[in-house]
Amino acid sequence: MLRFANSGHAEAQYVKAQVLALEASAERAGAALACAYSSSAEFDAALIAQRRAAGVYGPRRHRKQRLATAAVIAAALAVIVFLIV
């Protein structure tokens, strides 16, 4: 290994660069471990809401509401027909 007169300075710069790189890696690792959700249920709820907004699950269907409306209309028509006849 060849050593130059200013190799101490070069080594110091190399060590400083390595320390800075290590600090940057530690920051990125800490940011990767941070989570915006306090529980898995909160994460799942946000994920489902995002997917619904994107239209992944398709349009919402209100079958029970439609069935109840149809039943009320049929009952009202039956009462009207019974009163007329």
Image (cartoon, rainbow, N blue to C red):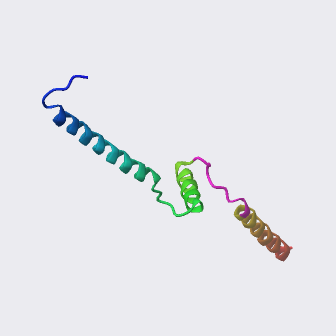
* Image position of 80 with respect to 46: above or below: below
Residue at the outermost top position: 2
Question: Is 62 covered by the magenta stretch?
Answer: yes
Main secondary structure of the magenta stretch = loop
Which residue is the extreme one toward the left? 5
Name the one closer to the observer, 14 or 77. 14
Count of numbered labels shown in the rendering: 0
| Horizontal side of residue 45 vs 31, given as left or right | right
Rendered-image quadrant of the C terminus: bottom right
Q: Is residue 45 magenta?
A: no
Can you give x and y, in whole percent of width and height, for residue 78 in the image?
A: 82, 70
Q: Is residue 68 left or right of residue 42?
A: right
Return the residue nearer the eye: 66 or 82.
Answer: 66
Give coordinates of residue 38: x percent, y percent: 52, 64
Residue at 42% x, 48% y is 29
Residue 52: x percent and y percent?
Answer: 57, 53
Q: Which residues are magenta?
A: 56-64
Q: Is residue 4 above or below residue 85?
A: above
Q: Nearer the viewer, residue 19 or 78?
A: 19
Side (left or right) of 74 relative to 50: right
Q: To which quarter of the image does residue 39 belong?
A: bottom right
- Quarter of the image with the N terminus is top left
Instruction: Name the residue located 54 percent from the left edge and 58 percent from the top edge.
Output: 46
Q: Is residue 54 above or below residue 6?
A: below
Q: Residue at x 18, y 35 (%)?
A: 8
Q: Position of residue 40 (x, y in %)?
A: 58, 59
Task: State the residue in front, 59 or 15.
Answer: 15
Left of 53 or right of it: where is 80?
right
